[in-house]
Image (cartoon, rainbow, N blue to C red):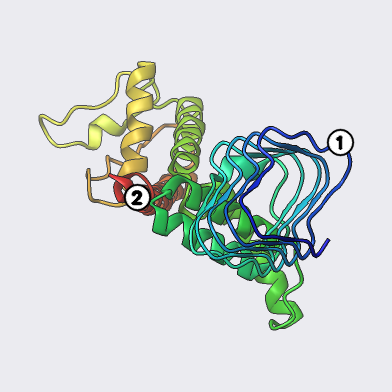
């Protein structure tokens, strides 16, 4: 540790069978570890004055670049980190790395480390990597103590954080909201069918104006009704259908279910469009 490399340093393809200890090392010229294989690796407080090449390197054990300084580009394309990567207080201008390379082993938790990496991804135009990093950060942040927030507020905010993760991935996963929407539509489809919508006891047609059509009990009609109620929650796409009137069924409960499906439709439509605008539309 503390070694100074004055010439160009090349460890390309080298397999480090033991721990690779470069703590405090200074690489005054170019440093290349391309296709190298590391076990536990320590570059704590190391300094790279020129480009640092780690392309296709495989980091099997824990890897630390804590307090390291990359004065020029750090190139980690196609590198893989099987265990935790530590970027706490690491300084770099451009870190060419992909989130999927880090995701398996994870990033050592530090707010500033996550924020710097997200900023790096955004500046490089790695939007999907930014989304993945942000999603992981939000989940990791929830498991940490929040000393600046009162305990009661922390508990409430962490409780609310779970549905934000599940329903739309903190704005990074639009298909979370989409598949939740499908599940809700199908659940209400089963409910409307159980009520007898469009069946012989359905008297809704009697209260409709002349020329207005109603369901005939076909499964696709009932599914279409559920979709219509769900989408009518926003009123952007479609007006709500008629509230059913079915003999032997409580209209009060039907009205509550009708309103609930519309409210859920409005909620998940908003979440879906927030996530779409923050991911797919942004990257287009």
Is residue 248 visible from the viewing direction of this image? no
Residue picked out by circle 2: 273
Residue drawn at the location 68% of the way across and 32% of the way down? 13
Q: Residue at x 72, y 75 (%)?
A: 146
Give the left or right position of residue 175, taking residue 107 as reference.
left
Image quadrant containing the N terminus: bottom right
Q: Residue at x 42, y 49 (%)?
A: 127
Residue 176 visible, this angle: yes
**Residue at the extreme top:** 218
| Quadrant of image for the C terminus | top left
Q: Position of residue 242 (x, y in %)?
A: 28, 40
Give the distance between the C-alpha atoms of the residues marked 1 and 2, in whole angstroms. Answer: 50 Å
Residue designated by label 1: 17
Return the x and y of residue 158 as percentages of the image width and height: 67, 65
Q: Quadrant of residue 261?
A: top left
Q: Name, please, the residue furthest toward the left.
A: 211
The local secondary structure at tag 2 comes to: helix
């Amino acid at each position: 540790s503390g070694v100074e490399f004055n010439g160009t340093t090349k460890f390309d393809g080298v397999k480090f069978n033991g721990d690779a200890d470069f703590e405090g090392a200074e690489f005054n010229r170019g440093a290349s570890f391309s296709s190298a294989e590391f076990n536990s690796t320590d570059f704590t407080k190391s300094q790279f004055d020129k480009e640092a090449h780690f392309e296709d390197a495989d980091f099997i054990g824990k890897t630390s670049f804590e307090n390291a300084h990359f004065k020029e580009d750090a190139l980690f394309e196609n590198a893989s980190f099987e265990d935790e990567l530590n970027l706490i207080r690491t300084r770099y201008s451009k870190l060419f790395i992909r989130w999927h390379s880090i995701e398996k082993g994870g990033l050592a938790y530090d707010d500033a480390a996550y924020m710097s990496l997200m900023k790096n991804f955004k500046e490089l135009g790695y939007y999907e990597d930014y989304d993945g990093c942000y999603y992981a950060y939000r989940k990791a942040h929830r498991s940490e103590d929040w000393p600046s927030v009162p305990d009661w507020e922390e508990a409430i905010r962490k409780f609310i954080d779970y549905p934000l993760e599940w329903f739309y991935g903190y704005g990074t996963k639009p298909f979370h909201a989409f598949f939740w929407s499908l599940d809700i539509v199908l659940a209400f489809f089963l409910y409307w069918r159980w009520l007898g919508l469009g069946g012989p006891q359905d008297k809704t047609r009697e209260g409709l104006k002349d020329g207005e059509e109603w369901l005939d009990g076909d499964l696709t009609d009932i599914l279409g009704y559920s979709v219509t109620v769900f989408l009518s929650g926003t009123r952007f796409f479609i007006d709500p259908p008629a509230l059913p009137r079915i003999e032997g069924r409580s209209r009060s409960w039907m009205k509550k279910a009708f309103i609930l499906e519309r409210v859920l439709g409005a909620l998940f439509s908003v979440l879906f469009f927030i996530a779409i605008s923050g991911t797919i539309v942004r990257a287009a």
